[in-house]
DNA sequence: CATGAATGAGGGTTCATTCAT
DNA sequence: GATGAATGAACCCTCATTCAT
């Protein structure tokens, strides 16, 4: 679930010789290299050798820090995507007073982060190998999907309480909010459909429309 | 783009012996076998040998009908998913008079077809290898995404004309309609999140909410 | 336990084209190559690539006939050594009437066969990896050791009945008969101690002495 | 042939601090660790890292004392098995007056020492790699086999002189005495054939029978 | 039309060994 | 005296693809 600890470092001396910094930076360097290779070739076609080379390490060197290719992907989930979901949770927690506004922030956070091909690459990878590595699928569901559901769910529930939202199942809310964002990202990154020039406006409009959809029923 | 023609049909002998049927059914059998293997293992991990075995053919036999593994995937797009998009186009063409109802039908068609793991598997595959095979991504965009956009776009435009929909960019409409459906399918098929018991109702509710979002602005 | 069957051969046609013979001969060719490589380098240090090359096959080709390196060794036991033990059993069965003579034949059979470095190589291999592959150790015990014990045991028992041998536990008899032979072979093949010029006479003397040892106690 | 001297013992400082003991104990600790790993995994499959860990040392640390994996094995022969052969030589030297009794002691010494899996492991290792490292085979032959031959040979010769033994080539005697012992050990340690309950008696009987075999010919 | 046989090109992973610190 | 870090060289095994039959 986490990389091998960068081989034991005695706390002892305070001096930090060059190679020490190296060792400490290595996991991150390797993850970044792995992400880039995964992004362009996919999980299976990415070669450990290329990942190593990109991290300026020998092939064997990678295994000093990560046990396997799969472990790299696992760690990418934890380090690259889970934080986004956690940020969403925090936004939700902090925004119970104004759920509409908080929801917008969550929406924008997700849009913005997933716009980065590096970030989008991770769910894309998970998607493509989840059948073969159920454990990874579970990790992603736990660390990302469920957190997003919690965040959105709590906001919609809060809004329903105060009358700014109608009462809808959390899954419906999540699909409505997250679905269109995900769709755009897939279309753009995976199917090479260039975003329209006015994407920003479109995304705003889109959210506004969703707010209308979620608004409480008007009394007839 | 299409399978090799079922090997040389000797002109001359006109009699159509029993095995002919067989030969003509082969491409379809192979595609089905390929789809099943791709579905469970993904594109890279699927083995041509297993595909062949599933189609009750020798490994080499597959190559009589398809040039490569990639060709199998290409043909799956054309044969398994493009028809759905074309059906959507037809629904749209036939439903210009009642765009709301037609849109619902398109929405339901998409939901229903993507519920089938066999169908969902194809976009999922494309997603996972589109970077390595841009040509396949383009094929999918052309054959599927653009058709869906056309279908939805024409309906929303028609509705805007007659005042049942507000005026929105086609991409926004597409994201709103297709995004939530896609999201559900990913969550279900890829992350093994079982659908809620009341999924049907949720999907209906979801569409109704989207109709509210797309409804023309009420005059204040 | 046995090699993959040389890929299915339809009984149909009687003509036997060149490559068919090939396929049928392959397992044996590969085993012989494997034995030679194992013999010179040992099990671990032997490389599948070298085995393949020696059998004039590509590396991958070997795997058409044998599932793994381990399988090669397993099959070597069955094909190279077990037959010796089975021959000993047959000699024993046929020689119940004259156990002394039969025992001598068994002794000479074992000496003669183990003199061949190719044959000796197999038990040697088993010995060196038996801890890591208990299944192979079991196979050897079952197919070779136990058979030899049975053969020797039945002869000694028969001899005891008719009074030409004294009564001794079968394991003692086996150790006395087989131990010296094995010792010689190990010393010669493994520790590079060249056999003395008069080995033949020594082996004969050795057996004669053992017969004295096994002779019934002389009444004082 | 021998371990690197325990790293530079700075002449000068004569005080012998506690860690000195440590350093001096190291080679032995490492050898013991190596033996244990070799014993369970065999020479090739044993990992220097595991040996080091077992000796509570870093991987690199082992190389301060031994030049290579091979060197470990070499030193094990010298330290673990050669002493047994030397003890046998001493027994032989001391027992010229009563060769029968001395031979029994040699026999029992060998049986007893080889019963220890740790001791048995060494010849077993040599056996498995002697082809690749002829030098090691030679070492073993020189240090162990030849010494045993000398010991047994001198006793049998002495016995022949005094008429308690018949005249037999030394190699025959060695095979007769050592072969059955070796056989038992192989069967037990390598093939996990548990020793019979009455092994002790069997081994005694075995030796007694061998004494009969070696007894001078009775005048007819 | 079909296949049995074969292979070239890796792919992930391991490990003995080295060296700067 | 000791080690953390690093690596080069393999090694077993796999698989898409080809081709003679």
Image (spheres, coloured by chain):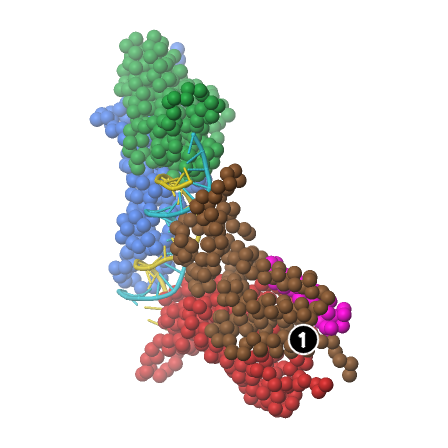
Chain colours: A brown, B red, C blue, D green, E yellow, F cyan
Point out the residue furthest to the left here.
Answer: C197
Q: Is residue C16 above or below residue C100?
A: below
Tell me the crowding category of disc 1: few under 14, some 14 to 19, or many 20 or more residues within 10 angstroms, Cα based.
many
A151 part of magenta stretch: yes
**Image-based side of F19 in relation to A48, left or right:** left
Q: Is residue D4 above or below residue A14?
A: above
Q: In the rendered image, which residue does mark 1 sit on? A: A211
> Residue at left 57%, top 89%?
B94
State the extent of the magenta-drawn residues as a range. Answer: A142-169
**Image-based side of A127 in relation to B103, left or right:** left
Q: Position of residue C163 (x, y in %)?
A: 39, 22
Q: Is disc 1 placed on a helix, strand or loop?
A: helix
> Residue at left 51%, top 81%?
B147
Point out the residue furthest to the right here.
Answer: A219
Q: Main secondary structure of the magenta part?
A: helix
Q: Is residue B65 above or below residue D76?
A: below
The answer to which quarter of the image holds residue A219 is bottom right
Q: Position of residue B170 (x, y in %)?
A: 56, 82
């Amino acid at each position: 679930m986490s990389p091998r600890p960068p081989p034991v470092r005695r706390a002892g001396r305070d001096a930090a010789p060059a190679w020490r910094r190296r060792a400490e930076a290595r996991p991150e360097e390797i993850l970044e290299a792995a992400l880039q290779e995964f992004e362009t070739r996919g999980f299976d076609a990415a070669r450990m050798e290329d990942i190593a080379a990109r991290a300026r390490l020998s092939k064997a060197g990678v295994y000093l820090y990560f046990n396997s290719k799969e472990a790299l992907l696992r760690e990418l989930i934890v380090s690259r995507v889970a934080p986004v979901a956690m940020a969403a949770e925090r936004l939700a927690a902090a925004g119970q007073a104004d759920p509409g506004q908080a929801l917008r922030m969550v929406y924008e956070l997700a849009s913005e982060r997933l716009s980065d091909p590096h970030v989008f690459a991770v769910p894309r990878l998970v998607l493509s190998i989840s059948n073969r590595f159920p454990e990874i699928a579970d990790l992603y569901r736990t660390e990302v999907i469920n957190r997003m559901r919690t965040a959105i769910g709590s906001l919609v529930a809060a809004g329903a309480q105060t009358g700014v939202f109608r009462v809808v199942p959390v899954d419906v809310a999540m699909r409505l909010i997250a679905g269109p964002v995900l769709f755009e990202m897939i279309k753009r990154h995976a199917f090479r459909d260039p975003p329209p020039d006015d994407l920003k406006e479109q995304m705003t409009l889109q959210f506004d429309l969703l707010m209308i959809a979620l608004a409480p029923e008007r009394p007839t």
